[in-house]
Image (tube, rainbow, N blue to C red):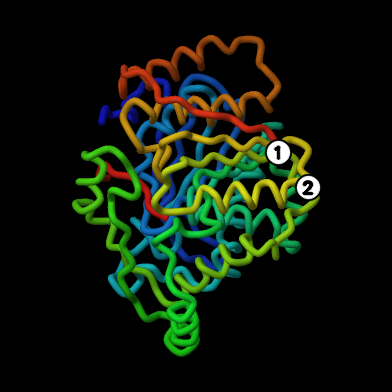
Amino acid sequence: MADANANANVKIEELTFKLQDDHPVYMKKWTPATSAPLAKLVFIHGYDDHINRYFELFPTLAARGIAVTAWDQRGWGRSVQHTSDRGLTGPTTLVIADIAHVVKSELADAEATSTPLFVMGHSMGGAEALTFASEPAYADLATRIRGWLLESPHVEMAPGSQPSSLKIMAGRLAGRLLPKFQLKNKLPAEELTRDPEVMKSLTEDPLLWSTGTLEGLAGLLDRAADLSAGKRTLNPGVKSLWLAHGTIDGGTSYTASKKWFEASTSDVPDKEHKTYEGWQHQLHADLPETRPVFAKDVGDWILARVEAPKNTAEPQAAAEAVVQESSAAAPAAAETTEGSPKGAAKL
Protein backbone atom coordinates (compact mmCIF):
# COMPACT_ATOMS: atom_id res chain seq x y z
CA MET A 1 0.00 0.00 0.00
CA ALA A 2 1.31 3.44 -0.88
CA ASP A 3 1.89 5.75 2.06
CA ALA A 4 -1.07 8.04 1.45
CA ASN A 5 -0.39 9.76 4.77
CA ALA A 6 2.77 11.22 3.24
CA ASN A 7 0.73 13.55 1.00
CA ALA A 8 1.90 17.12 1.55
CA ASN A 9 -1.63 18.47 1.32
CA VAL A 10 -2.69 16.69 4.51
CA LYS A 11 -1.74 17.57 8.06
CA ILE A 12 -1.76 14.67 10.54
CA GLU A 13 -1.99 15.03 14.32
CA GLU A 14 -1.87 12.27 16.94
CA LEU A 15 -3.00 12.98 20.48
CA THR A 16 -4.36 11.53 23.69
CA PHE A 17 -8.00 12.50 24.16
CA LYS A 18 -9.84 12.32 27.48
CA LEU A 19 -13.36 10.90 27.42
CA GLN A 20 -16.14 12.14 29.71
CA ASP A 21 -14.84 10.00 32.61
CA ASP A 22 -11.22 11.08 31.95
CA HIS A 23 -10.42 7.72 30.34
CA PRO A 24 -7.58 8.35 27.84
CA VAL A 25 -7.89 7.19 24.23
CA TYR A 26 -5.66 7.44 21.18
CA MET A 27 -6.99 9.97 18.66
CA LYS A 28 -5.82 10.99 15.23
CA LYS A 29 -6.81 13.89 12.98
CA TRP A 30 -6.34 14.35 9.24
CA THR A 31 -6.90 17.96 8.11
CA PRO A 32 -6.28 19.99 4.95
CA ALA A 33 -2.79 21.45 5.21
CA THR A 34 -3.27 24.59 3.15
CA SER A 35 -6.90 25.65 3.57
CA ALA A 36 -9.74 25.73 6.08
CA PRO A 37 -11.91 22.57 6.12
CA LEU A 38 -15.08 22.55 4.05
CA ALA A 39 -16.56 19.89 6.36
CA LYS A 40 -15.63 17.75 9.35
CA LEU A 41 -16.12 14.00 9.75
CA VAL A 42 -16.14 12.02 13.00
CA PHE A 43 -15.37 8.37 12.21
CA ILE A 44 -16.30 5.37 14.41
CA HIS A 45 -14.32 2.19 13.75
CA GLY A 46 -15.51 -1.40 14.02
CA TYR A 47 -14.92 -4.48 16.16
CA ASP A 48 -11.29 -5.53 16.73
CA ASP A 49 -10.15 -2.56 14.69
CA HIS A 50 -8.03 0.56 14.96
CA ILE A 51 -7.93 3.83 13.07
CA ASN A 52 -4.59 3.32 11.29
CA ARG A 53 -6.13 0.56 9.16
CA TYR A 54 -8.20 2.60 6.73
CA PHE A 55 -5.70 2.90 3.87
CA GLU A 56 -6.14 6.09 1.83
CA LEU A 57 -9.70 6.88 2.97
CA PHE A 58 -8.90 9.52 5.60
CA PRO A 59 -6.04 11.32 3.77
CA THR A 60 -8.07 11.35 0.55
CA LEU A 61 -10.98 13.00 2.33
CA ALA A 62 -8.69 15.51 4.04
CA ALA A 63 -7.06 16.38 0.72
CA ARG A 64 -10.52 17.22 -0.61
CA GLY A 65 -11.18 19.58 2.30
CA ILE A 66 -12.91 17.17 4.71
CA ALA A 67 -11.19 17.12 8.11
CA VAL A 68 -11.37 13.68 9.73
CA THR A 69 -11.25 12.88 13.45
CA ALA A 70 -11.09 9.24 14.53
CA TRP A 71 -10.08 7.47 17.71
CA ASP A 72 -9.34 3.97 18.91
CA GLN A 73 -12.40 3.25 21.00
CA ARG A 74 -12.20 2.20 24.62
CA GLY A 75 -10.93 -1.39 24.64
CA TRP A 76 -9.38 -1.33 21.16
CA GLY A 77 -6.10 -0.53 19.41
CA ARG A 78 -3.70 1.97 20.91
CA SER A 79 -6.22 2.96 23.56
CA VAL A 80 -5.45 -0.30 25.37
CA GLN A 81 -2.62 -0.05 27.90
CA HIS A 82 -2.90 -3.48 29.54
CA THR A 83 -3.85 -6.94 28.30
CA SER A 84 -6.75 -6.99 30.74
CA ASP A 85 -8.23 -3.93 28.96
CA ARG A 86 -8.60 -5.66 25.59
CA GLY A 87 -12.21 -5.56 24.45
CA LEU A 88 -13.22 -3.80 27.66
CA THR A 89 -15.73 -1.44 26.09
CA GLY A 90 -18.24 -1.24 28.90
CA PRO A 91 -22.02 -1.42 28.31
CA THR A 92 -23.80 0.25 25.41
CA THR A 93 -24.63 3.31 27.53
CA LEU A 94 -20.91 3.95 27.99
CA VAL A 95 -20.04 3.21 24.35
CA ILE A 96 -22.60 5.75 23.13
CA ALA A 97 -21.62 8.28 25.80
CA ASP A 98 -18.03 8.05 24.54
CA ILE A 99 -19.18 8.77 20.99
CA ALA A 100 -21.37 11.65 22.12
CA HIS A 101 -18.46 13.18 24.01
CA VAL A 102 -16.21 13.10 20.94
CA VAL A 103 -18.98 14.53 18.75
CA LYS A 104 -19.66 17.35 21.22
CA SER A 105 -15.97 18.21 21.28
CA GLU A 106 -15.79 18.32 17.49
CA LEU A 107 -19.05 20.24 17.19
CA ALA A 108 -17.73 23.00 19.42
CA ASP A 109 -14.97 23.74 16.92
CA ALA A 110 -17.10 23.08 13.84
CA GLU A 111 -19.92 25.38 14.89
CA ALA A 112 -17.48 28.14 15.84
CA THR A 113 -16.35 28.22 12.19
CA SER A 114 -19.76 27.34 10.64
CA THR A 115 -18.31 24.08 9.33
CA PRO A 116 -20.83 21.24 8.83
CA LEU A 117 -20.09 18.05 10.75
CA PHE A 118 -20.81 14.50 9.60
CA VAL A 119 -20.65 11.18 11.49
CA MET A 120 -19.58 7.90 9.86
CA GLY A 121 -19.30 4.38 11.25
CA HIS A 122 -18.03 1.08 9.88
CA SER A 123 -19.66 -2.25 10.77
CA MET A 124 -19.95 -2.33 14.59
CA GLY A 125 -19.23 1.40 14.41
CA GLY A 126 -22.10 1.79 11.96
CA ALA A 127 -24.51 0.15 14.40
CA GLU A 128 -23.14 2.41 17.14
CA ALA A 129 -23.72 5.46 14.94
CA LEU A 130 -27.34 4.39 14.36
CA THR A 131 -27.84 3.73 18.07
CA PHE A 132 -26.45 7.19 18.82
CA ALA A 133 -28.66 8.73 16.11
CA SER A 134 -31.77 7.11 17.61
CA GLU A 135 -31.06 7.67 21.30
CA PRO A 136 -33.55 10.22 22.71
CA ALA A 137 -30.98 11.48 25.21
CA TYR A 138 -28.90 12.77 22.30
CA ALA A 139 -31.72 14.11 20.12
CA ASP A 140 -30.32 17.64 20.45
CA LEU A 141 -27.01 16.51 19.00
CA ALA A 142 -28.70 14.80 16.05
CA THR A 143 -30.10 18.13 14.86
CA ARG A 144 -26.58 19.58 14.77
CA ILE A 145 -25.09 16.79 12.64
CA ARG A 146 -25.31 17.49 8.91
CA GLY A 147 -25.28 13.87 7.78
CA TRP A 148 -24.68 10.24 8.70
CA LEU A 149 -22.67 7.70 6.71
CA LEU A 150 -22.82 3.95 7.34
CA GLU A 151 -20.31 1.51 5.87
CA SER A 152 -21.36 -2.16 6.05
CA PRO A 153 -23.34 -1.50 9.25
CA HIS A 154 -23.85 -4.39 11.66
CA VAL A 155 -27.62 -4.83 11.63
CA GLU A 156 -27.17 -8.60 11.48
CA MET A 157 -24.16 -10.81 11.01
CA ALA A 158 -23.75 -12.37 7.58
CA PRO A 159 -25.59 -15.65 6.95
CA GLY A 160 -23.57 -18.57 8.24
CA SER A 161 -21.68 -16.54 10.83
CA GLN A 162 -24.58 -15.85 13.18
CA PRO A 163 -24.35 -17.45 16.65
CA SER A 164 -27.23 -19.67 17.75
CA SER A 165 -29.95 -18.23 19.98
CA LEU A 166 -28.93 -20.65 22.71
CA LYS A 167 -25.34 -19.45 22.56
CA ILE A 168 -26.49 -15.83 22.70
CA MET A 169 -28.70 -16.48 25.74
CA ALA A 170 -25.89 -18.30 27.52
CA GLY A 171 -23.48 -15.50 26.70
CA ARG A 172 -25.81 -12.82 28.05
CA LEU A 173 -26.31 -14.73 31.28
CA ALA A 174 -22.58 -15.24 31.69
CA GLY A 175 -22.02 -11.58 30.85
CA ARG A 176 -24.14 -10.48 33.80
CA LEU A 177 -22.05 -12.62 36.12
CA LEU A 178 -18.63 -12.01 34.54
CA PRO A 179 -18.91 -8.88 32.36
CA LYS A 180 -15.14 -8.44 31.98
CA PHE A 181 -14.47 -12.06 31.04
CA GLN A 182 -12.46 -12.08 27.80
CA LEU A 183 -12.89 -14.48 24.90
CA LYS A 184 -11.65 -14.74 21.33
CA ASN A 185 -13.98 -13.94 18.45
CA LYS A 186 -12.27 -13.99 15.06
CA LEU A 187 -13.76 -13.95 11.58
CA PRO A 188 -12.04 -15.61 8.60
CA ALA A 189 -10.03 -13.04 6.65
CA GLU A 190 -11.47 -14.17 3.32
CA GLU A 191 -14.92 -13.12 4.51
CA LEU A 192 -13.75 -9.55 5.03
CA THR A 193 -11.73 -8.63 1.93
CA ARG A 194 -10.73 -9.89 -1.51
CA ASP A 195 -7.16 -8.62 -1.23
CA PRO A 196 -4.64 -11.40 -0.35
CA GLU A 197 -2.26 -8.84 1.15
CA VAL A 198 -4.95 -7.52 3.46
CA MET A 199 -5.89 -11.08 4.42
CA LYS A 200 -2.27 -11.70 5.37
CA SER A 201 -2.11 -8.51 7.41
CA LEU A 202 -5.10 -9.57 9.49
CA THR A 203 -2.99 -12.26 11.12
CA GLU A 204 0.13 -10.10 11.49
CA ASP A 205 -1.20 -6.88 13.00
CA PRO A 206 -0.19 -6.85 16.70
CA LEU A 207 -3.10 -4.53 17.52
CA LEU A 208 -5.70 -7.02 16.31
CA TRP A 209 -6.09 -9.54 19.09
CA SER A 210 -9.68 -10.61 18.31
CA THR A 211 -10.52 -10.36 22.00
CA GLY A 212 -13.84 -9.15 23.32
CA THR A 213 -15.51 -9.22 26.71
CA LEU A 214 -18.83 -10.89 27.48
CA GLU A 215 -20.35 -7.51 28.27
CA GLY A 216 -18.97 -5.89 25.13
CA LEU A 217 -20.01 -8.72 22.82
CA ALA A 218 -23.49 -8.83 24.36
CA GLY A 219 -23.82 -5.10 23.78
CA LEU A 220 -22.71 -5.50 20.16
CA LEU A 221 -25.33 -8.19 19.54
CA ASP A 222 -28.06 -6.31 21.41
CA ARG A 223 -27.50 -3.10 19.43
CA ALA A 224 -27.76 -5.03 16.17
CA ALA A 225 -30.83 -6.95 17.36
CA ASP A 226 -32.62 -3.71 18.28
CA LEU A 227 -31.92 -2.28 14.83
CA SER A 228 -32.95 -5.46 13.04
CA ALA A 229 -36.21 -5.69 15.00
CA GLY A 230 -37.09 -2.05 14.38
CA LYS A 231 -36.89 -1.17 18.07
CA ARG A 232 -34.88 1.97 17.38
CA THR A 233 -36.34 5.04 15.70
CA LEU A 234 -34.03 7.67 14.28
CA ASN A 235 -34.29 11.03 16.01
CA PRO A 236 -36.28 13.66 14.04
CA GLY A 237 -33.11 15.70 13.62
CA VAL A 238 -31.55 13.10 11.30
CA LYS A 239 -31.85 14.82 7.92
CA SER A 240 -29.30 13.10 5.64
CA LEU A 241 -28.17 9.45 5.61
CA TRP A 242 -25.96 7.36 3.30
CA LEU A 243 -25.70 3.57 3.65
CA ALA A 244 -23.11 1.60 1.66
CA HIS A 245 -22.82 -2.20 1.60
CA GLY A 246 -21.17 -4.87 -0.55
CA THR A 247 -23.28 -7.75 -1.83
CA ILE A 248 -20.84 -10.52 -0.84
CA ASP A 249 -20.08 -9.16 2.64
CA GLY A 250 -19.00 -12.08 4.82
CA GLY A 251 -19.02 -10.10 8.06
CA THR A 252 -22.36 -8.31 8.18
CA SER A 253 -25.57 -8.94 6.27
CA TYR A 254 -26.17 -6.88 3.14
CA THR A 255 -29.80 -8.01 3.05
CA ALA A 256 -30.45 -7.04 6.68
CA SER A 257 -28.98 -3.55 6.35
CA LYS A 258 -30.97 -2.91 3.17
CA LYS A 259 -34.12 -4.11 4.91
CA TRP A 260 -33.37 -1.75 7.82
CA PHE A 261 -32.84 1.13 5.38
CA GLU A 262 -36.15 0.50 3.62
CA ALA A 263 -38.08 0.16 6.88
CA SER A 264 -36.47 2.82 9.06
CA THR A 265 -35.59 5.87 6.95
CA SER A 266 -39.01 6.94 5.66
CA ASP A 267 -38.83 10.15 7.70
CA VAL A 268 -35.30 11.02 6.57
CA PRO A 269 -35.70 13.60 3.77
CA ASP A 270 -32.29 13.00 2.17
CA LYS A 271 -31.17 9.37 1.98
CA GLU A 272 -29.26 7.02 -0.29
CA HIS A 273 -28.62 3.27 -0.27
CA LYS A 274 -25.53 2.39 -2.29
CA THR A 275 -24.92 -1.18 -3.38
CA TYR A 276 -21.38 -2.31 -4.22
CA GLU A 277 -21.92 -5.37 -6.37
CA GLY A 278 -19.41 -8.13 -5.62
CA TRP A 279 -17.56 -6.16 -2.92
CA GLN A 280 -16.61 -7.53 0.48
CA HIS A 281 -17.06 -6.26 4.04
CA GLN A 282 -14.20 -3.75 4.09
CA LEU A 283 -15.28 -1.33 1.38
CA HIS A 284 -12.39 0.95 2.33
CA ALA A 285 -9.88 -1.93 2.08
CA ASP A 286 -11.33 -4.48 -0.31
CA LEU A 287 -9.05 -4.32 -3.38
CA PRO A 288 -6.36 -1.77 -4.34
CA GLU A 289 -8.41 -0.73 -7.38
CA THR A 290 -11.68 -0.33 -5.44
CA ARG A 291 -10.38 1.59 -2.42
CA PRO A 292 -10.10 4.91 -4.30
CA VAL A 293 -13.62 4.42 -5.66
CA PHE A 294 -15.08 4.12 -2.19
CA ALA A 295 -13.07 7.08 -0.88
CA LYS A 296 -14.34 9.20 -3.77
CA ASP A 297 -17.94 8.14 -3.18
CA VAL A 298 -17.73 9.11 0.49
CA GLY A 299 -16.18 12.47 -0.33
CA ASP A 300 -18.65 13.19 -3.12
CA TRP A 301 -21.65 12.54 -0.85
CA ILE A 302 -20.32 14.79 1.90
CA LEU A 303 -19.28 17.65 -0.37
CA ALA A 304 -22.63 17.57 -2.19
CA ARG A 305 -24.15 18.63 1.13
CA VAL A 306 -21.71 21.45 1.73
CA GLU A 307 -21.97 24.90 0.18
CA ALA A 308 -19.43 25.03 -2.62
CA PRO A 309 -16.53 27.41 -1.99
CA LYS A 310 -15.37 29.82 -4.69
CA ASN A 311 -12.30 27.72 -5.48
CA THR A 312 -12.51 23.93 -5.23
CA ALA A 313 -9.82 23.09 -7.77
CA GLU A 314 -6.98 22.85 -5.26
CA PRO A 315 -8.64 20.34 -2.85
CA GLN A 316 -9.80 18.20 -5.79
CA ALA A 317 -6.32 18.09 -7.31
CA ALA A 318 -4.81 17.17 -3.95
CA ALA A 319 -7.27 14.30 -3.52
CA GLU A 320 -6.48 12.97 -6.97
CA ALA A 321 -2.79 12.94 -6.02
CA VAL A 322 -3.54 10.76 -2.99
CA VAL A 323 -5.56 8.34 -5.10
CA GLN A 324 -2.86 8.11 -7.75
CA GLU A 325 -0.30 7.24 -5.10
CA SER A 326 -2.38 4.30 -3.91
CA SER A 327 -3.72 2.81 -7.14
CA ALA A 328 -3.86 3.31 -10.88
CA ALA A 329 -6.20 0.41 -11.64
CA ALA A 330 -9.74 0.71 -12.99
CA PRO A 331 -12.62 0.59 -10.47
CA ALA A 332 -15.15 -2.19 -10.04
CA ALA A 333 -18.80 -1.44 -10.76
CA ALA A 334 -21.11 -0.06 -8.08
CA GLU A 335 -24.88 0.31 -8.09
CA THR A 336 -26.80 3.10 -6.39
CA THR A 337 -30.35 2.95 -5.07
CA GLU A 338 -31.83 6.22 -3.83
CA GLY A 339 -34.12 6.35 -0.89
CA SER A 340 0.73 1.32 12.58
CA PRO A 341 0.33 -1.89 10.48
CA LYS A 342 -1.43 -2.33 7.12
CA GLY A 343 -4.73 -4.10 7.25
CA ALA A 344 -8.46 -3.79 7.24
CA ALA A 345 -11.26 -3.48 9.69
CA LYS A 346 -13.45 -6.24 11.00
CA LEU A 347 -16.93 -6.04 12.46
Q: Amino acid at mark 1?
A: Ser
Does residue 275 appear to the left or right of 16 in the view shown? right
In the picture shown, does residue 174 fall above or below 322? below
Q: Which residue is mark 1?
A: 240
In the picture shown, does residue 154 fall above or below 267? below
Local SS, label 2: loop
Where is residue 342? Give x, y as percent. 26, 41
Residue 312 visible in the snapshot: yes
Local SS, label 1: strand
Q: Amino acid at mark 2?
A: Gly
- What residue is at 37 percent from the left and 48 percent from the top? 345
Does residue 16 appear to the left or right of 190 in the view shown? right
Residue 13 visible in the snapshot: no
Residue closer to the observer: 344 or 145:
344
Instruction: Name the disc covering residue 8, or none.
Output: none
- What residue is at 68 percent from the left and 54 percent from the top? 133
Q: Which residue is mark 2?
A: 237
Where is residue 307? Give x, y as percent. 70, 22
- What residue is at 46 percent from the left and 34 percent from the top? 277
Residue closer to the observer: 287 or 259:
259
- What residue is at 52 percent from the left and 59 percent from the top? 156
